[in-house]
Structures are given as C-alpha cells and as structure tokens.
Image (cartoon, helix red, strand yellow):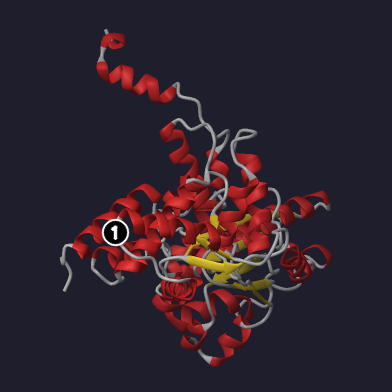
C-alpha cells in the first residue's frame, strides 16, 4: 500500500509541513501586481503617449520606448499599463487587445508578426505567408473587429541585432506604406539601453527615439516599499518582520549595496522564505536572508575564496571571526556595533593565543575588509544612541563562513600559507 511506503511518508511530511507562504507566486518575476509602487510617474507618461488611442482612435500609430537595466520593472510597467489601458478604453467603447512578445525568443520579423496573429487568435493559411502578408492579415482582422492592438516587444535589443534595420523600419513605419489604413497597431518597445539604436538607419532611429521612458535602479527606500507590498501578498501574517525587508532593501538598493534590482530583491525574499520552510522555522530571519543572498550574489563565492586562499592576514581573520560570532548572537539585527566586535575580537585572540591589536589598528582592519568586499561597514544613523560603526556580513550563511574562517586561522598558525 502507498501509505506504508517510505517514499510516501517523505512526500506527505513535506506537503503537510506548515509554510511561511500563502502565495509564493506573488514573488515570481512573471507575476503582475495590481500596484506598481514608485512607477506612478511613468504610468502617467505612458497614458499621455497613448491617450490618442481613445481621443482619436486610428489617427496615429502610437508607440513608446521603455529603457532601463535589469530588474527595474520595465516589463511589469509595460504589461500593467497595457492591460489597464485596454480596460479603460473598453469602458469608452474602444476595443483594445494586448499582445506580449519577447524578442529573445521571437528575433525575426516573421516570428514577431506570426506571434501577433497567434495571440490575437487569427488563423493563418497553411501555405507560407511573407511577414508583409501576415501583417496585412492581422490588420484586416482588427479592422473587421473594429479593434486595436497594443504590442509589447520586450528585449527589443535582440530583434534589432538579429533582424536589422529593414525589419525595424517595417514594424515602426509600416503605415507609411499603407496610408489608407486606419492605424490599429501600436507598440511599447522595451530595451536595456540605447546602444542598439545605432545599428539602424538614421530615419528609423529618429522614430525609435521618440517617447522614451527611462527607468533607474530603485533606492533602498523604494525597494523597502516594494518588498513590503509583495510580502503582504506572499506571506502569512507574522512570518516576515520589518527587519528582514529593510535588510534586503539595503543589500539591493542602488544607494545601498546593490544596483537597485527589484527582481533580485524579490528573489532573495522568496529564497529566504524557502529556507525558513525547509528548516521548519515558521518565520523568516536575517540568517535566511544571508543564505539567500549568497545564492544570488556571485560576489559571495569570491569572498569565500579570499578566506580560504590566504588573502587575509591572521588578525583580519580573527576580527572576521569575531564579527561572525557577534552577528550569530543577533537574530533580528543584521549589523554589529564596533564596540561589540572589539570585545569579541579580544576574546577570540585569547582563544587562539594571540595578542589583540589596539583600536586604531582594528579600525584599519575593518576598513581593509570593507575595501576587499568581505564585510559591510557604515556609520550608525538616526535612531541609535551615540555614533559608531555598524558592521554586517551578507556573503554567506554564518555557520559555513565561521567554519571556513576557523580553518583558515588554524592553517595560518600552523604555517600553512606561504
């Protein structure tokens, strides 16, 4: 019987285990939230660019170009706007359909126009149609339905690189060749930067460079707002504390330690939740965040290499061990105070039979470890009594890091490094 099977028991124990999540999907990259914190201004810009579709439908083929690095919400912004605009237009008696194409997959003109037809539910004949014939078929069907289409062309950089100037010209300026057509197809183009625009001819580039929306990386405060909103959707009440969200925001914010990548911030939060579930913790902790950050941040591997390959001096390692141990004693705080670290450093030196260095030298060690990227160090801010240096470690789970540092100290003391 399945119930007597060991495999069955394992599966049942995992399935029946309590979870911190109520909807993990809310943290996935393809999830489309109802709200876009800190992108209200850009939504308003898009509404202005596409307003003519409602006020003068069919007069002009409208378009916008969204530009920005990875993780700043380009695709989410385009999708949220397009679907909400279509609903708004519907209330005014104008039928607008949304087509969402990723040009990393559909890199040719034929692939793009056939994808448009497919998503709009337009059957194509079995015999091979040219891209122009497919476009005409799509347009004729929209004409028959008295409908419009907003076509999102995500990762448009790939389309330019693969298909070239003529294909871009066809998409963007196709109505120049059909002056009698009502303008029913409109575009939102998404690119990481404008470097690929140089690959098309000047006339086409001029068309592309109109109606540009540039997205910057998110700040720590902005990411905290985004994480708070998504955490409310994704987690059961009481399973994610404010300290966790603030720490992730600081690790990833453009004015913190990251590049302002919301996708990475949400990935860290999701993985931290996974670690909490795996351990049966019932609550996401700072240490779960460190474990998650180590997985998504390739810099973490380099830091561990610095420790194991003899790049740090003996007293830098002793100080690092002290930092780790202080941080391990703090479940809800991601940083240790300088005074706490110095006190623990003296205890570690006694443990390994070394004479501790003075405050000035210890502070130099802290600065050097920060420059090497091993630790995070910053002055204390508002809300903390007295001024001190706050020291954090996001490179790896503290238990694993502690083992590596202790091994490196013993190796150094035994003369194991050159």
- Indicate whether 311 appears above or below 29: below
Whether residue 25 appears in this view of the structure is yes
Count of numbered circles in the view: 1
Count neighbours of disc 1 (C-alpha within 10 A) and say few if under 14, some if 14 to 19, many if 20 or more. Answer: few
Image quadrant holding the C terminus, namely: bottom left
- Indicate whether 41 appears above or below 87: below
In the rendered image, residue 51, in percent from the top left (x then y), is placed at 79, 67
Residue closer to the observer: 98 or 347 = 347
Residue tagged 1: 353
Image quadrant holding the N terminus, namely: top left
Would you identify the image quadrant in which residue 149 lies? bottom right
What residue is shown at x 30% (from left), y 67% (from top)? 314
Q: Secondary structure at mark 1?
A: loop
Residue closer to the observer: 240 or 179 = 240
Residue closer to the observer: 408 or 193 = 408
In the rendered image, residue 187, in percent from the top left (x then y), is placed at 62, 68
Q: Is residue 371 left or right of residue 41?
A: left
In the rendered image, residue 103, in percent from the top left (x then y), is placed at 46, 66
Whether residue 29 appears in this view of the structure is no
Q: Farthest residue to the bottom: give it.
A: 202
In the rendered image, residue 123, in percent from the top left (x then y), is placed at 50, 50
């Amino acid at each position: 019987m399945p119930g007597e099977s060991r495999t069955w028991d394992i599966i049942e124990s995992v399935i029946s285990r309590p979870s911190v999540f109520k909807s993990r999907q809310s943290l996935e990259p393809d999830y489309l939230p109802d709200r876009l914190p800190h992108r209200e201004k850009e939504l308003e810009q898009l509404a202005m660019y596409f307003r003519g579709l409602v006020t003068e439908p069919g007069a002009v083929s409208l378009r916008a170009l969204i530009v920005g690095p990875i993780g700043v919400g380009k695709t989410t912004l385009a999708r949220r706007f397009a679907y909400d605009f279509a609903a708004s237009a519907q209330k005014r008696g104008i039928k607008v359909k949304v087509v969402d194409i990723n040009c990393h997959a559909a890199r040719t003109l034929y692939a793009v126009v056939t994808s448009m037809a497919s998503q709009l539910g337009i059957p194509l004949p079995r015999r091979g149609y040219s891209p122009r014939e497919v476009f005409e078929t799509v347009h004729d069907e929209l004409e028959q339905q008295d409908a419009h289409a907003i076509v999102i062309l995500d990762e448009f950089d790939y389309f330019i690189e693969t298909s070239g100037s003529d294909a871009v010209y066809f998409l963007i300026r196709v109505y120049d060749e059909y002056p009698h057509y009502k303008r029913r197809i409109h575009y939102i183009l998404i690119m990481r930067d404008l470097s690929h625009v140089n690959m098309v001819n000047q006339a086409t580039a001029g068309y592309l460079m109109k109606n540009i929306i540039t997205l910057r990386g998110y700040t720590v405060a902005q990411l905290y707002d985004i994480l708070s909103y998504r955490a409310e959707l994704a987690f059961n009440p009481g399973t994610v504390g404010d300290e966790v969200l603030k720490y992730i925001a600081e690790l990833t914010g453009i004015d913190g330690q990251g590049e302002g990548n919301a996708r990475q911030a949400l990935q860290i939060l999701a993985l931290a939740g996974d670690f909490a579930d795996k351990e049966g913790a019932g609550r996401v902790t700072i240490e779960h965040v460190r474990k998650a950050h180590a997985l998504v941040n390739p810099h973490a591997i380099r830091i561990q290499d610095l420790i194991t390959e003899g790049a740090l001096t003996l007293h830098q390692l002793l100080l690092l061990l002290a930092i780790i141990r202080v941080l391990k004693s703090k479940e809800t705080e991601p940083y240790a105070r300088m005074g706490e670290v110095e006190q623990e450093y003296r205890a570690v030196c006694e443990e390994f039979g070394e004479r501790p260095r003075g405050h000035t030298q210890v502070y130099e060690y802290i600065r050097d470890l920060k420059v090497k990227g091993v630790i995070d160090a910053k002055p204390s801010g508002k809300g903390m009594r007295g001024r001190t240096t706050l020291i954090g470690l996001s490179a790896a789970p503290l238990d694993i890091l502690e083992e590596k540092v202790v091994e490196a100290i013993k190796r150094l003391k035994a003369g194991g490094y050159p």
